[in-house]
Amino acid sequence: MWTQRRWAALAVLSIISLLSEEAAAIEVPLDPKIQQELKQPPTIVKQSLKDYIVDPRDNIIIECEAKGNPVPTFQWRRNGKFFNVGKDPRVTMRSRSGTLEIRSSGKPEDYEGEYQCFASNNLGTAISNKILLRVSKSPLWPKEVLEPVTVREGSPLVLACNPPPGLPPPETFWMDSFIMPIAQDRRVSMGLNGDLFFSNVLAKDAKTDYSCNARFEFTHTIQQKNPYTLKVQTMRNIPETQPTFLSPTGLSSTKMVLRGEELLLECIAAGVPTPTITWSKRGGDLPTKKVRIGNFEKTLRILNVSEEDIGSYTCMASNRIGSIRHTVEVQVKAAPFWLEKPINLVLAPDESGRLVCRANGSPKPTIQWLVNGEPIESSLPNPNRRVLDDTIIFETVQFESSAVYQCNASNEHGYLLANAFVSVLDMAPRMLGPKNQLIKVIENNRTFLECPFFGSPLPLLRWFKNGLGSGLDGGHYRLYHNGTLEIKQARTEDQGTYTCVASNILGKMENQVRLEVKEPTRIVRAPEHKTEPRGTTVRFDCRVKHDPSLPATVTWLKDEKPLSFSWIGRLKKDDESLTIYNVNPDDGGTYTCTAKTEIDEDTASARLTVTGRPDPPQDLELSDPSARSVRLTWVPGNENNSPVTHFLVQFEEDRWEPGKWQNLSIYDWNLNSVNLQLSPFVNYQFRVIAINAVGQSQPSHPSARYQTSGAPPDVVPSGLKGWGSKKNNMEITWQAMQNTERNGPNLRYVLSWRRKDTEEEWNNITTAKTKHVVHNTDTYVPYEIKIQAVNDFGHGPESNMVIGYSGEDKPSAAPTDLRVSKINSTKVNIHWEPVEQSSVNGEFKEYKLYYWREASLIKGLKVNKTKLQKGFFTTAEHPSGILTELYPYSKYKMYMVVANREHEGPQSNTVEFYTKEGEPGAPKYFRILRHTDVVHLKWDKPLEPNGVLIGYTLQYHTVNGTQAGERKVQSFPPNVTEYVMNLPHRFTRFKFFLAARTQVGAGEVYAVESPHFTNEAYKEQEDIATQGWFIGLMCAVALLVLILLIVCFIKRSRGGKYPVREKKDLPLDPVDHKDQDGSFDYHSDEDNKPLQGSQTSLDGNVKESDDSLVDYGEGGDGQFNEDGSFIGQYTVKKDKEETEGNESSEATSPVNAIYSLA
């Protein structure tokens, strides 16, 4: 059964081989188990160099290592003959290796020769390269006597080195007897052959110790040639000569170089002056990437030579006398190099394959095939093998076809040798990867499921998912020849168990891979770049979203280095952020947040720039001194990430205020050298402060001191003025001069004054003070005043003349014929006759009108009689003015005085007048009592009716969200203060507008809105004033107030001190009045005091209450009337200068009551 299946499979393979000529070679995996079981011909893995030079003082090691199964055995050939290692006691071969070790005793030259290693097992023989072993040599210089070299100055010279031929050739250099290198330049240099070339000899070249040295690399020895003695015959005039070549000679030469090696061309020329060397290539430019010009332009070096470097290279030597050229024809040859190196071939029985060995070189190399180390022509015939020049074709191989083949490609410049084995094997499929592997991948990523396998013949591999369906290949999947299954974009539905099955004619084997698709790890809130001042706290966000089944770790880096955290450190981190406390400049840098799970990661970075106050300027220097100036220069300090905007220059002087630093001047950021303007007679020192957006730097170190010379004052004292503090004097004052304005010692002031418009002599006084009083003056007369500063160096400039006045007295006359006209409800025109200017007895200030509200024309309405005033500045012949902001429908009184700056004169006649009716104020309160089916409205008369009330106007409309219904109007007589309205529906809400009316018109509007209806059981609000506990509390408060009042009156009668509250508007005692005709009484009612609310006129410009009635009963500012209804908020129009006497703006309390009564 097995044989039938095998032969059926082989038949299929034969058909395939006919279609594709031969099957692809099997790649043997490096799996240790496979390698251990697999039979394999030998393979050379390590060998010594073809040209092998050894140090004679060391043991000689010739390496040859090979692998194979079974383990190979080793043999050596020396100079083409079998080398019997066992017969030579100085030669040993390492165990399980072909490496030879030759002990250093005796003559190592005896072992020089060509060695080749053979590694064999029962499947074939591999061979190494032919290793040419040579022993390093470092011979001595031949003994010679060097005669002194004598040349004329300007002549060329070559000092030959001729080092002994070593192996490898030595490195040469020239030195003198002090072991110092001979100086080289364009004129003197060493050639490639080691000779020392002089383009022209100078007198300074005469020496007795030109010595050539040869350094041998292997033996680490230096051999020294006997020194040359150079004598130079000097000449008065060195003749100039045209260039000639010292190396190479002639006009042309040829140079052959092997491909891949280094090309060295040299041109050294003689001549006076020293010639200059230039290089060029015929037909093109020099390859700048490969060419190196050295040795003072005398050598041209091309690295890694290739065929494109073939051509003619020309060096030209030129000086001002002429030029000369030398052309080098460069030929590039090539030792053999691989085009296609033969590789090991592993085949199953009856499969076909080929070995290819292709090489190139110049001249073209010949190809020779060997099998197991012997020429293929002399091997046993093999009907399954055909040799076609550089190719060997194998057909229907069998187990006995296994062997190691060698390809030798050689020409006159070298050879290449490669081993490649042909191994025929059969093996059932093997799975090389781990069993039942779990793979976690990120959603939408390209995913690879690996299933490494091996077998011979090469197994067929197929993939299945969850054990169902046909093989996976195509569409969403792609299957690679090595067994890897690619999922182009992994999705959640791709999760599951995948099975890979490998099968050939010898059997089959399977493996499973479980795939889990996870959500990607993402930083959803990344850190942002920040610029913060020093000392602040900085927070970088790093919020991460990841698959819940994958633990994520967040790490922070600063400038790609991990951050360390501690309990007491300034750096703290939590799951979503990094916080840096008290940042300093060292904290600046790039911070990177890395969120990582076991299968993916995400990073985000942000830059922190820490700004700080700038460092103080440094290195202050003074220069360019003069009598009144000096130049100050400084070096700015570090700006600390915030640009400097200004520099502040300060000074300190040690005469007037030593130790006190004062601002001198400020300069822009781009200046660091400024010319300072100085004052005389000051011993300065300076410092500079840098300023940026964060703040000021520390002051710089002080500069050296700079003393200016003295001079008379050059400024005038400021602020000179004269005024009278009494009616018979005049005080003259001025401002003291600054210390830097003194300009010298012993500063004094020369003050002069005289009466204006007289021919009096000037009165003078010299004083160090800043005030002088002139006594016994007439009342309010003008004086001319001037002042001058003086010091020990002389007098300063004299000030301009100013006019001062002596003191004022009370005005002696009163305005007359005070009268009014054009009276309306809130204003009145006033007229009077002016006083004589001479009666003012001073500087006229104003006519001051005193007026007060004597009474209201409404019976019973108490008013505030506080006296008010208004000034009128006018010098008209018939003065007049307008008095505004009066209360309508009131009786007023007034009188007038004239005032100067210090005093008021006698009163004028007193005038009475009556203002007309006006529009009333808003109702005192307006309340809504909401019941289930009705709305009960209550209100009270205005505090300021401003005339005789004739009624009230009520407007209202429904409210539905932001939409208003049709507005309706109701009018009421003056004695009606409540209204009950039926609700069409219990959820209907209304907005109400109420205004009082006089004959003049409607007044301010009080607007309220009905509250929301709730589904809870509706309860009437009980009037808190009707509750027993509240009545008891109020009685206790009243008793306490009475006791306090009694105590205050007792203390007052005894002269004791008590607090007095100063109020501009004194309240009047409340008095109840009721007219017999049924009109309302006006009185103060603290219990019914309204809340501050909103009023407007009936034209619709409503200023609504700040508090919503939706929450009525909860506000701290709300009050309740007798039946428990809510008192709406409203405002009362008041004069800014006065308040109603019966309405205190303070909350009612016993303490306030005491203050007001006191």
Image: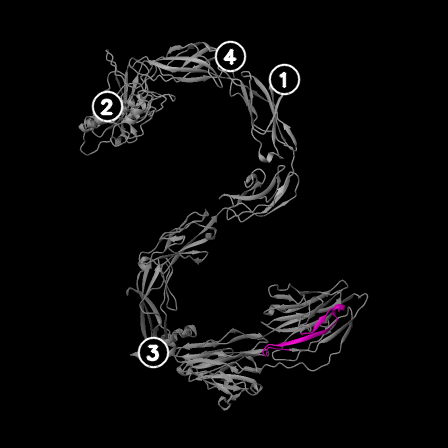
Residue pointed to by mark 4: 839
Q: Residue 760 carries which label?
A: 1
Residue pointed to by mark 2: 937
Query: Secondary structure under badge 1?
Result: loop
Residue pointed to by mark 3: 7
Query: Secondary structure under badge 2?
Result: strand
> Could you tell me how far apart the alpha carbons at marks 2 and 3 are, in whole angstroms?
114 Å
Count of numbered badges drawn on the protein: 4
The residue under label 1 is which amino acid type?
A: Glu
The residue under label 4 is which amino acid type?
A: Ser
The C terminus lies in quadrant: top left
Is 212 inside the magenta-drawn segment?
Answer: yes
Q: Which segment is the magenta one?
A: 193-222
Mark 2 or mark 3: name the one nearer the start of the chain.
Answer: 3
In percent of width and height, residue 404 lies at 46, 81
- Give the residue at x 42% y 77%: 346
The N terminus lies in quadrant: bottom left
Residue 372 seen in the current view: no
| Eye-nearest disc, 4 or 1 | 1
> Which one is nearer the viewer's eye here, 963 or 944?
944
375 sits left or right of 243 in the view: left
The residue under label 2 is which amino acid type?
A: Leu
> Which one is nearer the viewer's eye here, 971 or 957?
971
Q: How is the image coloured?
A: one colour
104 sits left or right of 532 in the view: right
> Could you tell me how far apart the alpha carbons at marks 4 and 1 are, in whole angstroms?
26 Å
In percent of width and height, residue 53 lies at 57, 80
Q: Residue 305 carries which label?
A: none
